[in-house]
Image (cartoon, rainbow, N blue to C red):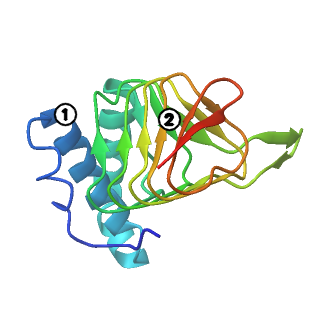
Amino acid sequence: MAKSNHNIFQDWAINKSNIKGRLVLMAFRVAHWATLNKLLFILLLPYSVLYRLWVEWFLCIEIPFKTTLGKNTRLYHGHATVINDGCIIGNNCVIRHCTTIGNKQINENTFSSCPIIGNNVDIGANVCIIGPVKIGNNVTIGAGSVIVKDIPNDCVVVGNPSRVIKNH
């Protein structure tokens, strides 16, 4: 599963021809790094505010700096991407535009835990992954899929509700 890595350029090479993805992920890595130490967070508080303004308001990509993203994350287009800060996303994952990954509201004041996504997961455009689900390693999620149940390792998933159509 994803570990905190303090290299702010860890996603640079994998997003070679994707300038927006490079810049957003580098900005995320700096903001995330600042959350690991209270003094550092206080020193970088203005940066954290600018990160939220620039990434969330201007680029319309919500990746809070408390989110756990594994190394070599690919962010294609990114527009309208929303990831809850409690999500854990593994290494070598692909996230496409209009993707929502987060918890679900159980009642007025209670929310579920967030998804845990394994390594080498390819998430198609306009995918919703909601609730306390676990997605295994080496999974491909087709565009427009809605994931509300656990997904095993090594498979292709499509549809609403999602279903496994192929095992690797």
Q: Is residue 102 left or right of residue 17?
A: right
Mark 2 = which residue?
82
Using the image, determine if residue 120 lies above or below residue 146: below
Front residue of 158 and 165: 165
Q: In which quarter of the image is residue 120?
A: bottom left
For the point 73% across and 45% down, the residue is 149
Residue 119: % across, % down: 42, 60
Front residue of 83 and 89: 89
Q: What element carries label 1?
A: helix
Q: In this view, does 60 lie to the left or right of 163?
A: left
For the point 68% across and 23% down, the residue is 160
Disc 2: CA contacts within 10 A as few (<14), some (14-19) or many (>=20)? many
**Does the residue at mark 1 contact the one at mark 2 (Cβ under 8 Å)?**
no
Q: What element carries label 2?
A: strand
Q: Is residue 86 visible?
A: no
Residue 37: % across, % down: 40, 77
Distance from disc 1 to disc 2, alpha carbons, whole Å, reads 16 Å
Q: Which of marks 1 and 2 is nearer the N terminus?
A: 1
Q: Quadrant of residue 69?
A: bottom left
Residue 18: % across, % down: 14, 35
Mark 1 = which residue?
20
- Identified by mark 1, the residue type is Lys
For the point 32% across and 68% down, the residue is 33
Which residue is the extreme one toward the right? 107
